[in-house]
Image (cartoon, rainbow, N blue to C red):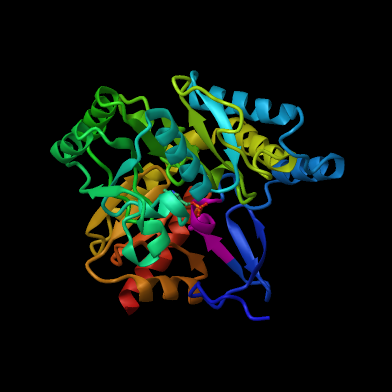
Amino acid sequence: MPLFDVYPLYNVTPVSGKDIHVYDDKGTEYLDLYGGHAVISIGHAHPNYVKAITKQVETLGFYSNAIQNPLQKQLADKIETLSGCNDYELFLCNSGAEANENALKLASFKTGKKRVVAFKNGFHGRTSAAVAATDNGTIIAPINAQQAVTILPLNDIEGVKTELEKGDVCAVIVEFIQGVGGLDQGTKAFFEAVDNLCKANNTLFIADEIQCGYGRSGKFFAFQYYNVTPDIISLAKGMGNGFPIGGILIHPSIESKYGMLGTTFGGNHLACAAGLAVLNTIEEENLIANTNEISEYLISKAKTIPQIKNIKGRGLMIGLEFDFEVGELRKQLIYNHHIFTGGATNKKLLRILPPLTVKKEHIDQFFDALKKTLEEV
Ligand SMILES: Cc1ncc(COP(=O)(O)O)c(C=O)c1O
């Protein structure tokens, strides 16, 4: 049976991984500066992670959400400790889109309203309301388009004010560092004004931290660079280091009710074991400090490359903008130098999203390869 052909594929077949590297079926080593799309947080096949998942699957891999599962509470407590988000409650699901879908649904339940404000170049997933809030008409089917969404330019404080004052907006959803769109960030004044406008207009502020969260920005959450209090924070990607897990942190001003949200797989034992191993490793190996140190190093090296016209993002979520489209450059980095990097909607941007365990020597290897490739293209 053929696979439904929705992904353009590179001709590489990784079969194993170790920390910052993956290995293909011929034994070739690749430097992974893409982290499987910002998913690999603590490195491929981290021994603590492998041990925790193995032990859990040998014991109890899954039971439904109809029973006590203390691992969920342990995970919630650990997120609280590491993030410093003390007042929130946790709901677990399986992916980023599902996290945002639940966030938007909760906002609508809580406010009784149904329009969403989102931003240009934002990406929030491919399901119902999440895709409608995504600024990409080509992935919005007619069935999704029925959702009421208004897309505004980032930093358009007046636009947000005008829309929220109409009284029908349940949520403003934003990535504090845009991922797929190309690493743009709103200003401090913008984020803080949106936070205040939401509070003044009975609209919930949703921080989509699916890509920029979990330490990747250099703080546990990217919104923590600002003086804001999101009502809901959505998580996925780095949360499971490849194990499918997502979640939302919910401010206690939103009251829970039986049946309000639900899932078969979300929060299962195996997912929680993976999630706990990720957080324990981030803590034990000081990976957020490493993120900041390597980020600084990466940015300082990027500044020495004349062809790099702009450096975007924070932490280990960095965009290197050239004055040409980078598709061919990415291909050459993969095929000639065995280095994975990412692209973005902005075709001139190379996205660097390595595991948070990356070291200076890997950054050196990347820049050596980049310089050679730039001489050739
Ligand atoms: C910011 C952001 N939100 C949501 C999603 C959707 O996550 P998933 O692909 O797990 O559904 C993504 C995925 O790239 C993302 O980057």
- Residue 33 lies in the magenta stretch: yes
Position of residue 225 relative to residue 209, above or below, is: above
Measured as percent of width and height from the top left, residue 152 is found at: 22, 47
Q: Which residues are magenta?
A: 30-39
In this view, 66 is above or below 14: above
Q: Is residue 334 left or right of residue 25?
A: left
**Where is the N terminus found, in terms of image quarters?**
bottom right
- Residue 372 shows in this picture: yes
Could you say where residue 343 lies in the image, as x and y percent from the top left? 39, 64
Q: Residue at x 30, y 26 (%)?
A: 202
Residue at image coords 40%, 36%: 108
Residue 13 position by quadrant:
bottom right
The total of numbered circles placed on residues is 0
Residue at the extreme right? 58
Q: Is residue 213 visible?
A: no
Q: Residue furthest left?
A: 158
Image point (49%, 66%), residue name: 339
| Quadrant of res 190 | top left
Report the side of 90 relative to 233 (left or right).
Answer: right
